[in-house]
Image (cartoon, rainbow, N blue to C red):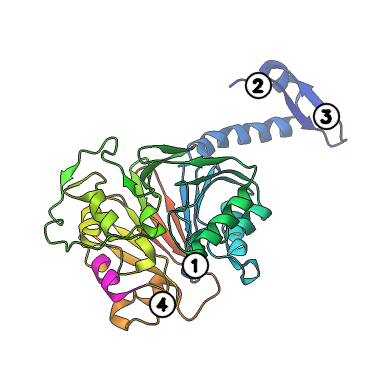
């Protein structure tokens, strides 16, 4: 044990400064020395505390906002939900930030320029410091609403650091690895450390139509924290999903899957869902947005899936295509913004907490 200097306060209020271990124990009162020894003994236990990755699937009523916080407090926010609603979505992002113990966002990733993903960026950018903004580049969709939302995004980030990413690049967040799998309609060929395997689910997959919207341009990421793997493909639609994993799958199995495109049946092709073999899936649907029976069934039947969590009851679906109440954050209507919090360990084990009920389910490493 080395002690460069230390302060201890006497009962009289005087402080004593010492500069070596010998003088430290010679001069300190017994009570103060004893307190120091207890503190020193506690330090190894604190130092050995297992690092954790926190992932918040924030309820933005059928949009996306996902907050990742490393063991070191470094953060990545993926999308920011909708604009308007009296700053509702920014309020909910900030609530997750408080729970995680952070006051700034290091990296803000916009998967694509649809309003339910990018619309909330101007509001959250006004409220909290953001280190850099990341996206796929120019808006590619020929629609007035998307051009409007892209322009609002550019105005909000004017003069601030912006990075355009491409497949194969990484986002540097101390504590976990973030690999870009898809961006601007292009996909990665090889994932480091993974040998692409023939995907037997491709042969039976119907050929989907090409998608001219921003959904097909989504930035998709693979997050790795030790043995734990998390996949988020934004709103990538079937043609691009299939191109990513057929004829060979470069991704491999994942522990946690954020259901693509909120559970719309335009996404979540069996070719990708069955190939990635998720242990747990979270669907960021709304009460009356997405959560389609076809997508729900595909994910529910995925080999090895233990639980499918939903941010809302899909009220336009039926009971057979909704998860049990304990696995739904907001059971009725727009809800109160309940979220799911995932806490992962480097050994691959993780837990999922429903903020509405306070209940936590553990998933040990298999």
Q: Which mark is residue 3?
A: 2
Q: Label 4: few (<14), some or many (≥20) within 10 Å?
A: many
Q: Which mark is residue 179?
A: none
Mark 3 or 1: the one toward you: 1
Mark 4 or 1: the one toward you: 4
Q: Which mark is residue 313?
A: 4
Mark 4 or 3: the one toward you: 4
Q: Helix or strand or loop: what does disc 1 sit on? A: loop
Q: Which mark is residue 15?
A: 3
Q: Are marks 4 and 3 in contact (CB under 8 Å)?
A: no
Q: Is residue 35 left or right of residue 16?
A: left
Location of residue 184 with respect to 290 vertically, above or below:
above
Q: Helix or strand or loop: what does disc 2 sit on? A: loop
Q: Helix or strand or loop: what does disc 3 sit on? A: strand
Residue for point 37% across, 63% down: 261
- Earlier-in-chain disc, 4 versus 2: 2
Q: Are marks 1 and 2 in contact (CB under 8 Å)?
A: no
Q: Quadrant of residue 189?
A: top left
Q: Which residue is mark 1?
A: 358
Q: Label 3: few (<14), some or many (≥20) within 10 Å?
A: few
What's the CA distance linking mark 4 and mark 3? Answer: 61 Å
Q: Quadrant of residue 15?
A: top right
- Earlier-in-chain disc, 4 versus 1: 4
Front residue (pair 99, 230): 230
- The N terminus appears in which quarter of the rendering? top right
Q: Are marks 3 and 1 in contact (CB under 8 Å)?
A: no
What's the CA distance linking mark 4 and mark 1? Answer: 18 Å
């Amino acid at each position: 044990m080395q002690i460069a200097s230390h302060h201890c306060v006497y009962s009289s209020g005087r402080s004593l400064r010492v500069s070596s271990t010998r003088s430290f124990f010679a001069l300190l009162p017994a009570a103060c020395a004893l307190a120091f020894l207890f503190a020193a003994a506690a330090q190894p236990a604190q130092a050995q505390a297992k690092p954790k990755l926190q992932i918040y699937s924030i309820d933005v009523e059928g949009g996306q906002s996902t907050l990742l916080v490393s063991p070191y407090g470094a953060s990545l926010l993926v999308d920011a939900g909708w604009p308007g609603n009296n700053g509702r979505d920014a309020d909910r992002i900030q609530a997750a930030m408080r729970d995680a113990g952070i006051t700034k966002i290091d990296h803000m990733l916009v998967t694509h320029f649809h309003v339910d993903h990018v619309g909330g960026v101007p509001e959250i950018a006004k409220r909290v410091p953001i280190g850099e903004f990341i996206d796929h580049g120019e808006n590619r969709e020929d629609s007035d609403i998307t051009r409007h939302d892209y322009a609002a995004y550019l105005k909000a980030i004017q003069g601030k650091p912006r990075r355009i990413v491409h497949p194969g690049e990484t986002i540097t967040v101390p504590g976990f690895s973030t690999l870009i799998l898809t961006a601007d309609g292009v996909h990665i060929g090889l994932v480091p450390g993974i040998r692409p395997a023939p995907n037997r689910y491709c042969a039976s997959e119907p050929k989907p139509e090409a998608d001219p919207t921003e959904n097909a341009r989504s930035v998709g990421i693979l997050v790795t924290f030790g043995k734990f793997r998390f996949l988020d493909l934004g709103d990538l639609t079937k043609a691009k999903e299939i191109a990513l994993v057929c004829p060979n799958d470069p991704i491999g199995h994942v522990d946690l899957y954020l259901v693509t495109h909120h559970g719309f049946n335009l996404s979540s092709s069996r070719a990708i869902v069955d190939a990635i073999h998720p242990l747990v899936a979270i669907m960021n649907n709304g009460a009356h947005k997405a959560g389609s029976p076809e997508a729900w069934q595909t994910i529910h039947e995925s080999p090895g899936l233990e639980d499918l969590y939903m941010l809302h009851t899909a009220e336009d679906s039926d009971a057979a295509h909704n998860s049990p109440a304990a696995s739904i954050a907001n059971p009725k209507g727009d809800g109160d913004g309940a979220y799911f919090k995932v806490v992962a360990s480097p050994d691959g084990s993780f837990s999922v907490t429903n903020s509405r009920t306070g209940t936590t389910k553990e998933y040990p490493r298999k």
